[in-house]
Amino acid sequence: MSDSLLSIHELRKDYGDGRQILRGISLDIPKGQFVGLIGLSGAGKSTFLRCINRLVEPSSGQIIVPSAVFLEAGQAKGSMPAMLDITLLKGGQLRAWRRKTGMIFQQFNIVKRLSVLDNVLSGKLGYVGAIRGAVRVFNAEERESALINLERVGMLSHAYKRADALSGGEQQRVAIARTLMQEPKLILADEPVASLDPKLSETVLEILRRVAAEDGITTIVSLHTLEMTRRYSDRVIGLAQGEVAFDDKPANLSQEVVDQIYMRYKQAS
């Protein structure tokens, strides 16, 4: 537990029409691990990621994290307990968790009419006051940080371009830089390269893995190809019908295991 960022216990998500999307997932994810998440469409991957940052409300279960995740540099812990259950957070604590949880989506979710730099600065909106955020006023330190993060993803030369002038791979690199502005402890990436060709996919995943390793960021990435999952992941978790069907090193993800994951899905559907 001491080296874990996430300890997930019996996480479930049910809908009122009887659908069970997550069926009691229990996992322990260490700090700094790069996790590949696989499974067919409908296996529960996106719901699982969204439950972790509370974009989707879990039906039951616990998501336990160290309270130190919520602290900013130099901030005292005060009376906070050592561990907190994400499923119980409200108000300011929930906002603090979302600040520390970067989300990267398949469709990039950048504002195309804004410049690349302004898109990256958007990652800081959770830290500035309501007035500054509304008028998008950022100080020199924040702008310098945005430029540094653009350099880290190889996009510094594009800082003052409109985002709609970029290719899909470039837009996803901007989305990674924006996420780094949050100073996250955790990155959740939901099919971040599904809309890119294989070469661009490799570039984006190499950048994501590198910056996550440099900053010690725990990362869970939902991927649609087994080859990339094996190449970039420290650990692979396979979901089938909302249950953990595989949890091991990439080297142990044999074709037989893959067939079992997808056959299990087909038999249950």
Image: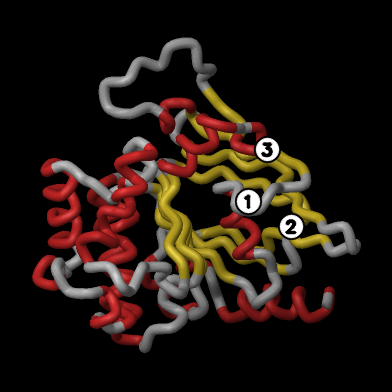
Q: Is label 2 in a helix, a strand or a loop?
A: strand
Residue 45 seen in this snapshot: yes
| Nearer-the-camera pick, 80 or 240 | 80
Quarter of the picture containing the C terminus is bottom right
Q: Crowding near pointer 1: few (<14 within 10 Å), some, many (20+)?
A: many
Residue 230 seen in this snapshot: no
Residue visible at 44% across and 47% down?
A: 101
Amino acid bearing label 1: Cys
Q: Is label 3 in a helix, a strand or a loop?
A: strand
Which residue is labeled 1 in the image?
51
Amino acid bearing label 3: Gln
* Figure colour scheme: secondary structure
Vertical position of residue 127 compared to residue 192: above or below: above
Q: Crowding near pointer 3: few (<14 within 10 Å), some, many (20+)?
A: many
Q: Is residue 84 left or right of residue 9?
A: left
Q: Which mark is residue 11?
A: none
Vertical position of residue 173 compared to residue 196: above or below: above
CA gap, disc 1 and disc 2: 10 Å
Residue visible at 16% across and 69% down?
A: 155
Q: Is label 1 in a helix, a strand or a loop?
A: helix
Amino acid bearing label 2: Leu
Q: Which mark is residue 62?
A: 3
Q: Quadrant of residue 255?
A: bottom right
Q: Earlier in the sequence, mark 1 or mark 3?
A: 1
Residue visible at 42% across and 68% down?
A: 109
